[in-house]
Image (tube, helix red, strand yellow):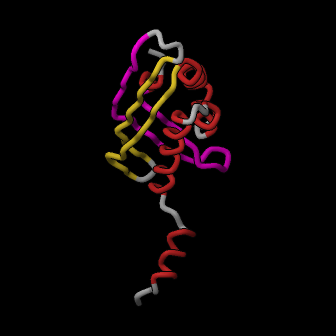
Amino acid sequence: MILPKATFALTLAIAPSWSATARELAADLATALSTDNPQAFLRRLEPTLREEFRRDIEGLCASFDISSAIDVLREEGATLEVDWLLELKPRDGARGAIRRRERVTVETGESKGRLLVIRLRPRAFFGSP
C-alpha cells in the first residue's frame, strides 16, 4: 500500500530515527558555541561528561568569539562522526584567529530519561589553545 504524501510526512514527524536525533544534538552543540552559549552546549551532555567539559567550554566562550560548523561524515545508530570546524577569534584582539578542524565522534544515549551526548571525542579539540 502506498501512503499519501501527507500521511508519510506525519509518520516521519512522529517517529524520528536515532540518527536524526543524534544529528540534532550535534547541531545544537555547534550552534551553542557559535552563539556564545556555553550553558546550552553543556545541557546537551550527560552529567558526568558535562562536568568534564565545563571548564574548557566556558573558557573558550569567555576568551573567544567562536564560529562553529559541522558536517556529518558517518552515522551508525546513535553515533556520528563529524567533520567539525572551529574558528576562534580572541576577544582581546591580541593575536589572529585560530582554526581547528578535526573528525569528532558524537555518541548519544539516554540519561535520566533524556537523550543526551554521552561521549564526545577527542576532548582536546574543545580545550583552550
Q: Nearer the viewer, residue 121 or 31?
A: 31
109 versus 45 height, above or below? below
Q: Position of residue 69 (x, y in %)?
A: 42, 39
Q: Nearer the viewer, residue 57 or 34?
A: 34
Report the residue at 45% width, 82% height from top. Answer: 5
Q: Is residue 113 left or right of residue 63?
A: right
Query: Residue lying furthest right in this view?
Result: 112
Q: Can residue 124 be seen by looking at this rendering?
A: yes
Q: Position of residue 88 (x, y in %)?
A: 44, 23
Q: Nearer the viewer, residue 96 or 52?
A: 96
8 versus 112 height, above or below? below
Q: Quadrant of residue 59?
A: top right
Report the residue at 48% width, 61% height from top. Answer: 17
Quadrant where the N terminus sits is bottom left
128 versus 40 height, above or below? above
Q: Quadrant of residue 39?
A: top right
Report the residue at 36% width, 24% height from top. Answer: 99
Q: Is 108 colored magenta in this rendering?
A: yes
Query: Residue lying furthest top in this view?
Result: 94
Q: Is 66 colored magenta in this rendering?
A: no
Q: Quadrant of residue 37?
A: top right
State the extent of the magenta-drawn residues as a range.
95-122
Q: Position of residue 33 (x, y in %)?
A: 53, 33
